[in-house]
Amino acid sequence: MGELLNTILLMQKYIIALIIITTAFLWYSIKSKDKILLSTNIFLVSLVFTTSFPFIIEAISFIPRSIGLILKVTLIFLASGALFVSSFLTYKSRHEERIGVLKDILNKKQDDPLKLEFVREVIQPELKLLNKQKYLIEKEKKAVEKNIEFYKQKSEEISLGKIDLKNEWKNIKKENSLLTKEQDKLDELKDKLELESKKIEKLRLKTEKESGEIKEKKKGFLNYEDELNKEKAKLKLDFSDLEKEKKELSRFKQKLDEENENILLKQREILELNKKLKSAESENLNLRKKISTLQAVIKKNNLQEEQ
Amino acid sequence: MTLEILYFTMYLLSSVFIILSLIFLIKYKQFQPDQLSKSTDVYLFGLVFLFLYTFIIFLDSGKFIIGNLFPSFLHNYVVYVNYLMTISNLTFILLMSICYLTAVLIMKETNV
């Protein structure tokens, strides 16, 4: 890095020397061919360029470094000193010259040709311009005065309008305050609504859950209802069968009643028959007794005969 | 030591002279015509670079004073000034010479 920097610096020294020499030659050529404005201070500019000459020494290798350094410092010091003295003196002389000219122009007693020329060339055209401007301003002033009256009337109208606007403004302010109150209320309501909406949302979620459950239950109920309907249909069928059976039973009952009646009749008949039978039995008993007696008699008779 | 003091004084005076020259040249600019203002500005810029260069060398040559007055501060001062010296050697003189060349070229163009 250090070597590279040294190489760059060495190269740069030659480049700088080349640029400075080119500048010097260009300046000399311009100066010698009178291509410079008369107002250019050649000496001062030459001194400015001279301040760069000490840096050529660095590029000259045959001068020892210590002597080169002393030469460079001395030349910089001399060039800058000379430039300072020259610039100071030039500025001072020009400044004094300018002050003198200005004083001559301002001196009333002395008729300086420069002063007359200044008046003729500078002040007179300015005066003409000023007079023109004055005439134009007066014209404008008249126009403005006319306008002022018109604007005064307008301003009165505007002031009336302003009062109306003020009243309107007050009304608007009142309305605005009312509106703000309403707005506050609305905000409160909005907050409440938000809370309510949150609650509703919660409720909705709950109801959704419940509705889901209800749906499931409903499905269950529907299934149950279907089963019920099926059973109902079955029951209807059974009922119709039962009714048929009932009818048959009623018919059977009727028959039974009839039979009962018949039985009752028959029972009565049986009772009568029983009575008759009992009577017959009693007769039979009597008869049997009579028979037995008869038999005994017969037996006795038979025995007697045998004997 | 004497040589160091001499360098230090000469660089200090050179810096002062250059800055004063700059001030008077800027003041002198009002007496010059507008055609010259461009080239004047450019060589004034070149002088600014020259002032920066001399001022940094002046700081570099003032090492012995810092060494005597603030010995503990010397190391940092030397490091900082060496950086400044590297920058000034690389840029300021080159820029100054370019500014002077540009000023001459502008003069050649405008004053014909």
Image (cartoon, rainbow, N blue to C red):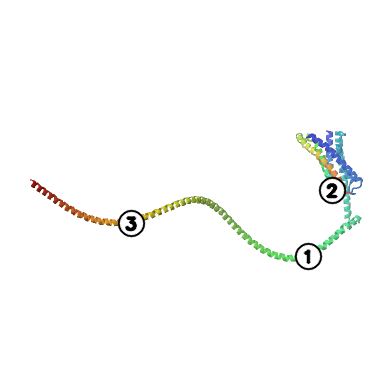
Q: Quadrant of the C terminus of chain A?
A: top left
Disc 3 on helix, strand or loop?
helix
Residue position for label 2: B38
Q: Amino acid at mark 1?
A: Ala
Of badges 3 and 2, the one in the foreground is 3
Q: Position of residue A172 (x, y in %)?
A: 63, 61
Label 1 CA crowd tier, 10 Å (few <14, some 14–19, many 20+):
few
Of badges 1 and 3, the one in the foreground is 3
**Residue A251 numbered mark, or none:** 3
**Rendered view: B73 above or below A215:** above
- Same subunit, tags 3 and 2: no
- Same subunit, tags 1 and 3: yes
Q: Nearer the viewer, residue B85 or A8?
A: A8
**Residue B34 numbered mark, or none:** none
From the viewer's perspective, tell me whether residue B101 is left or right of residue A280: right
From the viewer's perspective, tell me whether residue A63 is left or right of residue A144: right
**Rendered view: B17 above or below A269:** above
